[in-house]
Amino acid sequence: MMAHAPQVVFVSTESLTKLFELVKTLEQQARGTQVVAVGRSTDASLLMELMRYGIREFIPFPFSRESVFHSLTRVEESVAKNPPQFSITDQLYTFLPAKQGVGASTVALNTAWALGGIKDTSTLLLDMDLTSGILGFMLKLNPARTIVDAAQNAHQLDDSLWPQLVSRKGPIEVLPTGGLNPDFRVDSTQIRYLLEFARRNHSAICVDLSGNLERYSIEIMHESKRVFMIVTPEIPTLHLAREKLKYLTNIDLGDRISVVLNRTHKRAVITPEQVENLLGVPVMTCLSNDYQGIHRALQSGRCVDPATDLGRQFKAFATAILDKAAPTVEPKGRRLVDYLSILPGRYSAVSE
């Protein structure tokens, strides 16, 4: 039922037990869905029982054009006044690299894994880097189906097809990319159907983007609750992050963006406060530079060890994004543009 999100359901009165079970399910999952009963019997007790369960429309066999027309007209009016309310998640998070090689896929994977470990949080990880997606490799998947298959079948996704498309790994479901296919193009309608289905069937969704700002990536970010831009404490990365932030702000995405500062270490020259001053958006979390831990995770095809500092950081990050809005950190200390003289001169105009 949730897979198709119908506005109207036609049910037979041949089995009242199944009919009333369906009505209860609709009340729980899709309040407002109109139910039209059809059957041969017009017994008054049957009609009263239907009304007791909130079913106001009944079309008897054999159908007459006039009765069907009037019934559907009333149903249409009811749907317009009280559209169905499907239970869909707003926990859609996108991970956008400031530049290639900053570890965005690693952050997306481990955040999704940590989310999946939280009670009652069914989590989906989507690899939308269609040319260089690496999540399948990182998780040692060998899927028969990929995100390409899901996109091509997006208009007919249902509870029977979906398990054939996703791969289960640990506490999460994954839709990885497949082999390199430069000719494949995904359109807006496919993405819309795919996200609608996923949001009805999962509590949280993490999307790994390429960073190339394709049209479909922009649309996914507009659907997202938060967009996490992944940066590292390096000058070229922060320069490109700043340029992307300008563009994203111009297309009304600025208020959804938080920064994840990846590969930090105690002796880092660039501090989180300086990153915030330069970019003008909050650093939501800082993730340690644990090369050995990441390497071991790749070898095992799973998340980083939850018992390590980095593993605990991912768990805290996942908990934070589910429970509260992105926190802000008060800027302090010298501005990065003053501290790093090699930045282009135009950055000196950045306000505090």
Image (cartoon, grey):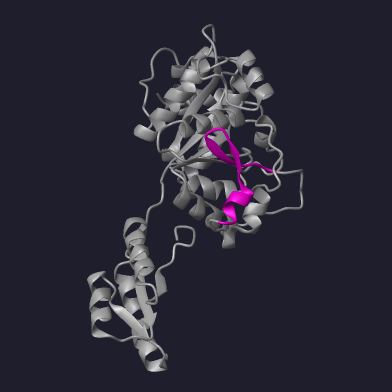
Q: Which residues are magenta?
A: 160-177
> What is the quadrant of the N terminus in the image?
bottom left
Q: Position of residue 111 (x, y in %)?
A: 51, 30
In the rendered image, the vertical position of residue 81 relative to residue 249, given as above or below: below
Residue 229 seen in the figure: yes
Q: Position of residue 332 (x, y in %)?
A: 38, 15
Taking the spot 25% from the left edge, 74% from the top edge, the residue there is: 49
In the rendered image, the vertical position of residue 72 relative to residue 225, given as above or below: below
Q: Quadrant of residue 193?
A: bottom right
Q: Quadrant of residue 7?
A: bottom left
Q: Position of residue 303 (x, y in %)?
A: 58, 25
Q: Position of residue 25 (x, y in %)?
A: 36, 59
| Along the viewing direction, whichever of 292 and 102 lies nearer the viewer | 292
| Along the viewing direction, whichever of 197 and 163 lies nearer the viewer | 163
Residue sticking out furthest to the top:
267
> What is the quadrant of the C terminus in the image?
top left
| Image-based side of 303 in relation to 93, left or right | right
Give yes or no for residue 171 being in the magenta stretch.
yes
Residue 324 seen in the figure: no
State the count of labels: 0
| Image-based side of 52 in relation to 266, left or right | left
Taking the spot 76% from the left edge, 48% from the top edge, the residue there is: 182
Q: Quadrant of residue 255?
A: top left
Taking the spot 77% from the left edge, 43% from the top edge, the residue there is: 180
Give yes or no for residue 210 being in the magenta stretch.
no
